[in-house]
Amino acid sequence: MKRFTAKIVDLMKQENLYASQGGPIILSQIENEYGNVDIHYGPAGKSYINWAASMATSLDTGKDLKDSRVLTDVGDVPIQEIRDCGVDDKRLMSVIGESVKLVMEEAPLRPLVLGGDHSISFPVIRAVSEKLGGPVDVLHIDAHPDNYDAFEGNIYSHASSFARVMEGDYVRRLLQVGIRSITAEGQDLKLGEGVKGVYISIDVDCLDPAFAPGVSHIEPGGLSFRDVLNILHNLQGDVVAGDVVELNPQRDTVDGMTAMVAAKLVREMAAKIAK
């Protein structure tokens, strides 16, 4: 059984839980200010964390996630505190990446990271590629390509993560699924060569709003929940890391439908990485 690194976080005693802090299963408590920074987890978000943290088995694969060889708590990274000390965005990306590398020192631990927004994908993918010694293939499931050179002047924004990823030799092949909003700028990507494994990045807004209304950037005509599960279950590559991002509980239904869907995605991602 392959191991991966993750964290079940109990944040139920927190007064303010930000969208950028992350979710139930997480490599480190990623706190950033690259989008939706003032969105607080309400009751739906707290219910999401509590419910997801109690999960132990992948329903579709039957994989038991209680085994410490499969699920490992590696602690938090106080990104927001570092930022409050005046550290700039570029350095913050490095802090996140170096944290991922430290965890991967204990090979074969594999990171599963939750945002927050999609800005975290760049430093995590870069770190995974550098640590493995070569590029990875990336499966990016999203409504948006997130490859603006800069968004509102910020080259490290949630809308620019994959532009940064493709500038280096971190990725051999980028496959984007579910894209429904793209600009001319977002159609020109270069690809590298060689591969060390597969990285999966899931933005919850890849789903049709009928299944997941609790996101910041709704795009009609999206994937169904089963579509995404089928993609995950049929993927044959060696999944070495991943992330799940962009849940916005403030826009969720009263009963937390999107939160439950996101938690289910996290569980299935965990099972996939642990396969």
Image (cartoon, rainbow, N blue to C red):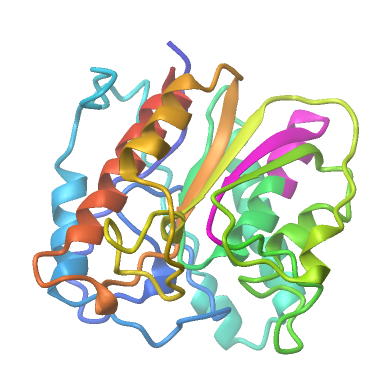
The span shown in magenta is 126-143
- Say whether residue 42 is magenta: no
Is residue 132 on the magenta stretch? yes
**Residue at coordinates 57% horizontally, 26% vertically from top-left?**
239
The one nearer the camera, 141 or 41, is 141
Residue 152, relative to residue 75: is it above or below? below
Q: Residue at x 41, y 51 (%)?
A: 75
Task: Residue 160: give x, y in percent of width and height.
Answer: 71, 69
The quarter of the picture where residue 255 lies is: bottom left
Location of the C terminus by quadrant is top left
Q: Is residue 78 left or right of residue 89?
A: left
Q: Residue furthest top?
A: 1
Determine the image quadrant of residue 187: bottom right
- Whether residue 203 is visible to the viewer of this picture, yes or no, is yes
Q: Is residue 107 visible?
A: no
In this view, the residue in front, 40 or 185, is 185
* Residue ID at (26%, 81%): 16
The correct choice, above or below, for 90 with respect to 261 in the image is below
Q: Residue at x 42, y 10 (%)?
A: 1
Q: Is residue 91 left or right of residue 239?
A: right
Residue 124 spot, x, y in % from top left: 64, 50
Total marks placed: 0
Task: Kindly indicate the quadrant of the structure image that contains residue 194.
Answer: top right
